[in-house]
Amino acid sequence: QVQLVESGGGLVQAGGSLRLSCAVSGSIFNIDVMGWYRQAPGKQRERVARIASGSSPDYLDSVKGRFTISRDNAKNTVYLQMNSLKPEDAAVYYCRVVIVTSTGGNEYWGQGTQVTVSS
């Protein structure tokens, strides 16, 4: 059983910052990819940032230079530091991880955390 618990969402004014956290617990052997996705009302879910074990992170073009993803492997936690937030960043943000086992990779999703940006 793997659980993802997200935190850090909320309401912020445009130009402000938020830091999202996603803690992974349970039967964890090898967390390969950790990432953040978002979904705004009426839009498809999109990948915001991801970081694979031993690799450099990659970002959605619209957040490059403003968002930073990082991971603490000792804590099985991934973070998303969001600076210079814009109204268009408002969405439900979801954490996703891929855990590799002897039979392959399995993905898990968090429950989502709301980010609201006021103009």
Image (spheres, rainbow, N blue to C red):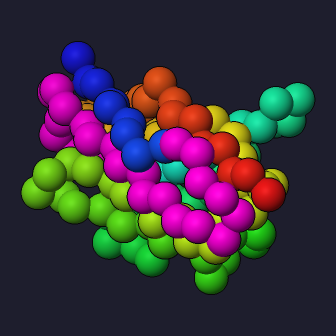
Q: In the image, 97: left or right of 92?
A: left
Residue 13 falls within the magenta-colored stretch: yes
Residue placed furthest toward the top: 1
**Secondary structure, magenta segment, majority class:** strand
| 61 vs 93, nearest the viewer | 93
Q: Is residue 115 visible?
A: yes
The image position of residue 19, as x and y in percent, is 42, 58
Instruction: Please report the bounds of the magenta region as a residue range.
Output: 10-31
Q: In the image, 8: left or right of 15?
A: left
Q: Quadrant of the N terminus?
A: top left
Q: Residue at x 35, y 49 (%)?
A: 21
| 34 vs 86, nearest the viewer | 86
Q: Is residue 93 visible?
A: no
Asked if residue 22 is positioned above or below residue 58 in the image, the reply reads above
| 61 vs 103, nearest the viewer | 61
Q: Residue at x 14, y 51 (%)?
A: 75
Residue 11 falls within the magenta-colored stretch: yes
Residue placed furthest toward the left: 74
The image position of residue 60, as x and y in percent, is 70, 65
Q: Residue at x 88, y 29 (%)?
A: 42
Q: In the image, 116: left or right of 9?
A: right
Q: How many marks?
A: 0
Instruction: Tell me which corner region of the image, top left, top right, bottom left or bottom right, holds residue 103.
Output: top left
| 5 vs 53, nearest the viewer | 5
Q: In the image, 58: left or right of 60?
A: left
Q: Quadrant of the C terminus?
A: bottom right
The image position of residue 57, as x and y in percent, is 49, 72
Residue placed furthest toward the bottom: 65
Q: Residue at x 32, y 72 (%)?
A: 54
Asked if residue 60 is positioned above or below residue 111 in the image, the reply reads below
